[in-house]
């Protein structure tokens, strides 16, 4: 007997900067992976989809082969394979840790179920995912290299997957775990007047964009701007998103439980 999908899922992204050491190529942050698996297990969410980023696994390899420019020459074909392999290695560590914490995690490879067009998701096989959720599995996807109907192939970010899946699965909320406390009015590392924005609407976000853009630290702000861009369609759809610092213990746990937590809530 199989239940109908009665509970709207939570779609959660774990950023590459949280689960890997971004300074060292192909280096996982095993204590962080372990702690997060424990938090996810304790939160005991009914209906959960996880998506993780590439960090020091996907990004340096994809860059080495110039994959973000799409297909240019045949040497990149090997690069596609190697980048995908790097991502599957990271994914195995995450899935393994989740299983050790008694979570029925199942890898779902974006490269096997997504086609993009000029870098944007054009089609995604959703039936297996929906069925997995009905069966109470926890599908684990990741930013990946995928085939692209125009460019040959593309790098598909976990952020784009999160937003698209949240809409397709009619998610109850999105949780985004990053390595900063949330969205700030400036760069908190260099600007002492920068303050954490606890709640923002799409309208407020529009006004904030030039401010975020003006900040000097491209890693933090560029990443945040990109995230906002990707999250917008899901928020417009009525799905609230919360950004929390996943390097701080228990923030992911609280966000999953729907408890009050330090972070930024984005709502329509
Ligand atoms: O870290 C990128 O995923 P992201 C994945 O979510 C690759 O942007 C293959 C670089």
Image (cartoon, rainbow, N blue to C red):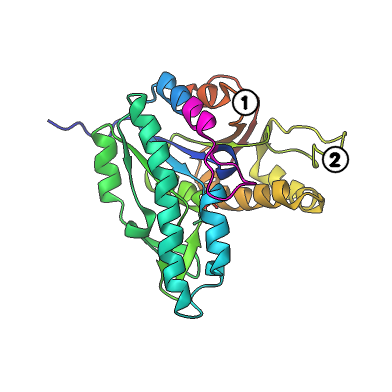
Residue ID for mark 2: 190
Along the viewing direction, whichever of 212 and 232 lies nearer the viewer? 212
| Disc 1 residue crowd, few under 14, some 14–19, many 20+, Cα 10 Å | some
The C terminus: image quadrant: top right
Q: Residue at x 40, y 56 (%)?
A: 85
Indicate the quadrant where residue 107 lies.
Answer: top left
The spot of residue 4 in percent (x, y) is 22, 34
Assess whether residue 241 is covered by the magenta stretch: no
| Disc 2 residue crowd, few under 14, some 14–19, many 20+, Cα 10 Å | few
Q: Is residue 57 left or right of residue 44?
A: right
Q: Residue at x 54, y 36 (%)?
A: 29
Look at the image and tell me whether residue 170 can be seen.
no
Along the viewing direction, whichever of 252 and 94 lies nearer the viewer? 94
Assess whether residue 21 is covered by the magenta stretch: yes
Look at the image and tell me whether residue 37 can be seen.
yes
The spot of residue 87 in percent (x, y) is 44, 51
Which element type, helix, strand or loop, lies under badge 1? Answer: loop
User: What residue span does the magenta drawing correspond to?
Assistant: 19-36
Please say if 35 is above or below 153.
Answer: above
Residue that lies at the very extreme toward the bottom in this rendered image: 73
Residue ID for mark 1: 248
Q: Earlier in the sequence, mark 2 or mark 1?
A: 2
Please say if 256 is above or below 51.
Answer: above
Q: Residue at x 85, y 40 (%)?
A: 190
Please say if 116 is above or below 48.
Answer: below
């Amino acid at each position: 007997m199989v239940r109908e999908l009665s509970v709207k899922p939570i779609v959660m992204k774990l950023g590459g900067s949280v689960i890997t050491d971004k300074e060292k190529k192909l280096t996982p942050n095993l204590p962080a992976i372990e702690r997060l698996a424990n938090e996810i297990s304790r939160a005991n969410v009914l209906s959960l989809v996880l998506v993780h980023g590439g960090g020091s696994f996907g990004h340096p390899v994809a860059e080495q082969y110039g994959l973000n420019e799409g297909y240019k020459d045949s040497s990149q074909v090997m690069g596609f394979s190697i980048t995908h392999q790097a991502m599957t290695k990271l994914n195995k560590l995450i899935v393994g840790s989740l299983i050790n914490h008694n979570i029925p995690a199942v890898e779902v490879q974006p490269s096997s179920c997504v086609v993009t067009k000029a870098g944007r998701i054009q089609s995604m096989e959703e039936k297996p995912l929906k069925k997995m959720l009905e069966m109470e599995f926890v599908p684990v996807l990741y930013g990946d290299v995928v085939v692209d109907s125009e460019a040959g192939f593309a790098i598909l970010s976990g952020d784009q997957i999160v937003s698209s899946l949240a809409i397709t699965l009619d998610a109850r909320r999105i949780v985004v775990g990053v390595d900063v406390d949330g969205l700030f009015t400036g760069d908190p590392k260099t600007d002492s007047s920068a303050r954490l924005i606890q709640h923002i609407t799409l309208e407020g976000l529009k006004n904030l964009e030039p401010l975020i853009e003006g900040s000097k630290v491209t890693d933090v702000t560029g990443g945040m701007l990109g995230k906002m861009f990707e999250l917008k369609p899901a928020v417009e759809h009525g799905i609230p998103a919360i950004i929390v610092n996943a390097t701080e213990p228990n923030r992911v746990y609280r966000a999953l439980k729907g408890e009050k937590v330090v972070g930024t809530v984005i709502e329509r």
